[in-house]
Amino acid sequence: MNVRYGSLEQLGFGQPELDIHANASRWNGLGAGKTAVITGANAGLGFFTSLGLAAAGAHVVLACRNQARAQKAMEQILARVPSASLEFMQFDADSTISAMALAAELRTRTIDVLVANAGMIHTPAERQPGLFGYEAVMSTNVIGHARLIGELVEQFRSHPLRLIGLGSMSTLMLRADPQNLKLEHGYNPYRAYAQSKAALQALTIALDHRLRQLSWPSRSIAVHPGYSVSGLSPNIEGINEPDFAKRLGGRLQAGFAQGKHQGAVAIVEAALNPGIQGCAPGAYLGPQYTSKGRITLASPAKVTRGKALQDEVFKLFTAANEGLDPFA
C-alpha cells in the first residue's frame, strides 16, 4: 500500500467521525502503552488533541510555557477522562534552550507521538526580531520545534515515532516566498503567520521523505485543522470561554468553519491510525472541504512540497541545530 490522496478508508480502518467525542470508540485503546507529547497543549487545538489522546489510553505530556494553565487543562481532561495519564513539562517554543531542556527530559523515554502544535496565532502588527535573524512568528512557530526535533533524532532512528506538524489552510491562500522567509521586507501579520505555517508544513513533509530514504521506522505527518474557531468549540472553563461576540461570529461562519474539537480530529487520527504507516511519503491530513469536513488524505500547498521552500527550510533547521542537519 502506498496511498497518497483520498479517503482514509483506503488505509483499512474506516473513516473517522467529525469530532473527537464522536471518535471515542474508534480510538479507544489505540493509545495504550504510548507516550504522546503535545506542545502548546493547554488551550485550543492542543487541548482537544490532548483530550482525544488521553481518552484513547495514551500517556500525554502537556509541553507548555505556563504551568498554571497546563494544570488547569489537566484538571479539565481528568474531569472528562478520570483514568487519564497526564504530565506537565516546560516548553517555550520561542527558545532553543527550552527545546534542549525538554529534549533532555524526553531522551530517556520512548516517545511515540510528538505533536508540534505550540505557536503564535495573534501575530504582531510590526516585525519583531526572533532567533537567527528570523522574525518572532517564524521563531515561535518553527524554530523551537526544529531544535526539539533535532535533539530527539535518536528517537526517530530507534523506533516508530510519529511527528505531527501543524500546517494551515492559510498556506493555500498566500504563497510563501522561499527567498524571504525572514520577512526582512514586506512584513505583515497575516503573511508572517502563513509563512511560518508553510515552513513548518514543508519541514514536516521533507522530513517524512528523508525518513523513508534513511529506512528509519518513524513518520513525519503534516496536518491542517481547517478553519477551526473558538466560537464553535465546546465551552470549557479556563480553556475555551468565548464571549457572546465570538459565539455569534462562530454561528455566522458555521457554513465554512468548525470547532477546535473537530479540527483536532486530523491530529489525533495522524497519531493513532495504524494505516498511516502505509501512506506514501509526504502524507498530509486535512478536512474534505478544506475549511471543514471529514478528514482525508489531502493535497498540500504546492510550494510546501517543492524543493525551493524545503531547501530554505532545511537551512533554518540546520541553523536551529547549531549548523548541523541531524538527519543527514
Image (cartoon, helix red, strand yellow):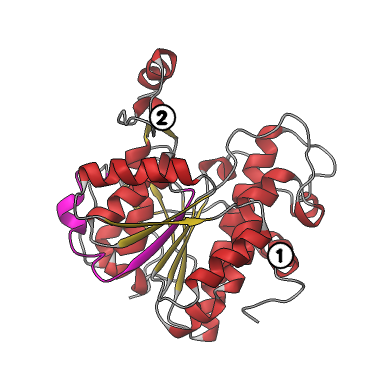
How far across and down, in percent of the image, does residue 136 sit? Answer: 72, 44
Quadrant holding the C terminus: bottom right
Query: What amino acid type is highlighted by mark number 1?
Result: Ala
How far across and down, in percent of the image, does residue 123 sit? Answer: 65, 34
Residue at the location (52% across, 50% down)? 167
Q: Is residue 207 left or right of residue 290?
A: right
Q: Quadrant of residue 22?
A: top left
Residue at the location (56% across, 56% down)? 201
Residue 106 in sight here: yes
Q: Earlier in the sequence, mark 1 or mark 2?
A: 2
Q: Which mark is residue 117?
A: none
> Badge 1 is on which residue?
320
**Numbered label tally:** 2
Q: Secondary structure at mark 1?
A: helix
Quadrant holding the N terminus: bottom left
Query: Is 24 colored magenta in this rendering?
Result: yes
Q: Is residue 250 left or right of residue 96?
A: left
Q: Secondary structure at mark 2?
A: helix
Residue at the location (64% across, 41% down)? 193
Query: Is 278 colored magenta in this rendering?
Result: no
Residue at far left of view: 25
Q: Which mark is residue 230?
A: 2
How far across and down, in percent of the image, does residue 265 sit? Answer: 32, 48
User: Magenta residues, as a range?
Assistant: 20-40
Front-most of 307 and 145?
145
Front-most of 58 and 87?
87
Query: What amino acid type is highlighted by mark number 2?
Result: Ser
* Mark 1 burial class by Cα count in 10 Å: few <14, some 14-19, many 20+: many
Q: CA distance from mark 1 to mark 2?
A: 32 Å
